[in-house]
Image (cartoon, helix red, strand yellow):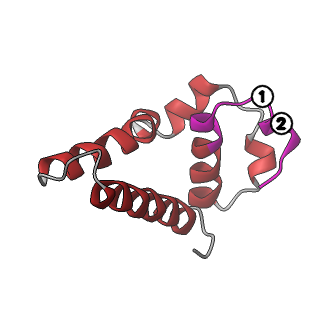
């Protein structure tokens, strides 16, 4: 999604706008100007979940006993990242 107002926003802000737009059926461009504080108020807890999603995936992989330097770990990490991206797209109303 290319929205000019997004150019100076953080990844977390863009994610929150997309989630809010999907939830409320609103054009993301109309929400892009909302301040971060307002996005957090409208979607409580989502920013922290977004910011730690990769660390959660890494912790799950490590917990399974896979060596983080092994090819198996790298493949699993890539697969987990792809899965998280697909979930985000589906949750935002986009096909994966």
* Residue at mark 2 to residue at mark 1: CA–CA distance: 7 Å
Figure quadrant of the C terminus: bottom right
- The answer to the question of whether label 2 and label 1 lie on touching residues, with beta carbons closer than 8 A, is yes
Q: Is residue 67 left or right of residue 3?
A: left
Residue 55 in the image: state x and y as whole percent.
Answer: 33, 39
In the figure, residue 27 lies in which quadrant? Answer: bottom right
Q: Tell me what residue is drawn at x 57 percent, y 64 percent.
A: 89
- The residues colored magenta run 1-14
Locate residue 75, reporting x and y percent: 37, 62
| Vertical side of 28 occupied by 37: above or below | above
Tell which of 39 and 91 is nearer to you: 91
Q: Residue at x 57, y 42 (%)?
A: 16
Could you say whether the residue bearing mark 2 is in a helix, strand or loop?
A: helix
Return the residue at label 2.
5
The image shows residue 2, relative to residue 14, as above or below, that is: below
CA neighbours of label 1 inside 10 A, class few (<14), some (14 to 19), many (20+): few
Binning the other alpha carbons within 10 Å of mark 2 as few (below 14), some (14 to 19) or many (20 upward) gives some
Q: In the rendered image, which quarter is residue 77 located in?
A: bottom left
Instruction: Indicate which disc residue 8 carries.
Output: 1
The number of numbered badges drawn on the structure is 2
Left or right, 67 with respect to 6, comes to left
Q: Nearer the viewer, mark 2 or mark 1?
A: 1
Q: Is residue 35 left or right of residue 90?
A: right
Assess whether residue 15 is covered by the magenta stretch. Answer: no
| Residue 82 coordinates in the image, percent (x, y) | 48, 62
């Amino acid at each position: 999604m290319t929205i000019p107002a997004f150019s100076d926003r953080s990844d977390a802000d863009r994610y929150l706008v997309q989630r809010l737009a999907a939830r409320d059926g609103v054009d993301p461009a109309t929400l892009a100007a909302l301040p971060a504080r307002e996005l957090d108020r409208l979607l409580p807890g989502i920013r922290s979940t977004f910011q730690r999603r990769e660390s959660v995936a890494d912790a799950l992989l490590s917990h399974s006993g896979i060596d983080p330097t092994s090819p198996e770990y790298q493949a699993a990490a890539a697969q987990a990242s792809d899965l998280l991206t697909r979930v985000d797209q589906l949750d935002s109303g986009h096909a994966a």
